[in-house]
Image: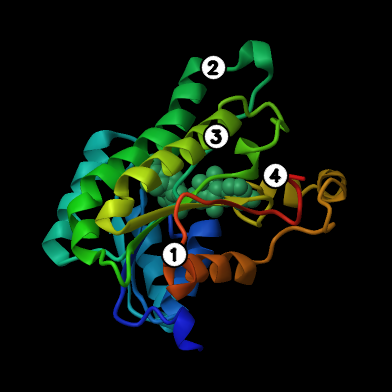
Amino acid sequence: MHPYFSLQGRTALVTGGTRGVGRMIAQGLLEAGARVFICARHAEACEQAAQELSAHGECTGIAADLSSEAGAQALARDLQERLERLDILVNNAGTTWGAPLEEYPAKGWEKVMQLNVTSVFSCIQQLLPLLRKAGGAENPARVINIGSVAGITAMGEQAYAYGPSKAALHQLSRMLARELVGEHINVNVIAPGRFPSKMTRFIADDPTALAEDTALIPMKRWGREAEMSALAVALASTAGAYMTGAVIPLDGGFHL
Ligand SMILES: NC(=O)c1ccc[n+]([C@@H]2O[C@H](COP(=O)([O-])OP(=O)(O)OC[C@H]3O[C@@H](n4cnc5c(N)ncnc54)[C@H](OP(=O)(O)O)[C@@H]3O)[C@@H](O)[C@H]2O)c1
C-alpha cells in the first residue's frame, strides 16, 4: 500500500460496523493498518463480526445502543477507559422507516431522527476529548459521517424522515467542520447511493424492484464494497488531511 493511504498506528471507531456499509468501512480501515473498534446493539453480532474482521487486523467489538444519549455516553466512557486518543470516528449507524404519507407514524420519524442525527451529534460531543488528543496540524483527527444521496435529491420513496435526517446530518457536518477545524479535527460526509446491506435487501431481493432501481442510476449498477472501503480510507489518510466540510456523493452519479 502507498504510504499516502497507510493508517498504521491509528485507532478508529466505526458505529454500526457489524454489517453493511459500516463493515465495508471497518474492513478498509483494518486493511490500511488501523486498529478498529466496531459497535452495534447486539453483543453477539459485535463479537462475531469483530472475530471475522480480525482476519484483516486488530478489531474489537463493543455492544452499544445509540438510540439514546445515555448509549453514546456509555460508549464514550468505555472507549475512554481503553484509549489515549481516537484518530478516526466513523458515524455510520443509521436507520430508516417507510410508510404511506397519511399513515407515517411519529414514532418512525423520531426513531430515524434520533439515530441518524441526534446520536451522531452525541457521539461527536462525547468523543471530542479523545479526538482532540489525536488531532494535530500535520495530521488532523477525522470524523467521517455517513449521510446519503437521499439527503441531496428529492427521491423519498415514502421514507419521509430519512432524507430530511440525512440533509440535517450533512448540514451538521459542515457546521462542525467549520467549528472544529481550529482544533485539527476534520469532518466530512460520505453520501452513498445504493450499496448492498440489510437496509437495501428489500430491493436487492426483488428482481423487478432491482431492475427499476438500477435503471435510475447513471452508472447502471449499485456500489461495490471495495468502493466504499476505499473512499473511507482516503478520507482517513493523507488524501483527506486537507479536506473538511465536504459532502461526497458515492452514488454512480445518482445525485445528478
Ligand atoms: N446501504 C445503502 O445503500 C445506503 C445508502 C445510503 C446511506 N446509507 C447509510 O449507511 C449507514 C449504514 O447503513 P446500512 O445500509 O449498512 O444498514 P444496516 O445493514 O441496517 O446496518 C446498520 C448498522 O447499524 C447498527 N445499528 C442500528 N441501530 C443501532 C443503534 N440503535 N445503536 C447502535 N447501532 C445500531 C446495526 O447493528 P444492530 O442492528 O446490531 O444494532 C448495523 O451494524 C446508515 O447510516 C445508512 O443510512 C446506506
Q: How far apart are marks 2 and 1 (CA)?
A: 42 Å
Mark positioned earlier in the residue sequence (3 or 4) = 3
Dividing the picture into quadrants, the one containing residue 52 is bottom left
Near mark 2 (Cα within 10 A), the count class, few <14, some 14-19 or many ≥20, is few
Horizontal arrangement in the rendering, residue 19 relative to residue 131 (left or right) = right
Asked if residue 63 can be seen in this view, the reply is: yes
* In front of the other: 99 or 153: 153
Query: Could you say which disc has been placed on residue 242 in the image?
Result: 1
Q: Distance between the residues labelled 3 and 4?
A: 23 Å
Identify the amino acid type marked 1.
Tyr
How was this image coloured?
rainbow
Question: Label 4's element?
Answer: helix
Q: Which x, y percent locates residue 178? A: 38, 45
Mark 2 touches mark 1? (CB < 8 Å): no
Asked if residue 75 can be seen in this view, the reply is: no
| Residue mark closest to the camera, 3 vs 1 | 1
According to the picture, the residue beneath numbered tag 2 turns out to be 105
* In front of the other: 23 or 45: 23
Q: How far apart are marks 3 and 1 (CA)?
A: 23 Å
Mark positioned earlier in the residue sequence (4 or 1) = 4
According to the picture, the residue beneath numbered tag 3 turns out to be 167
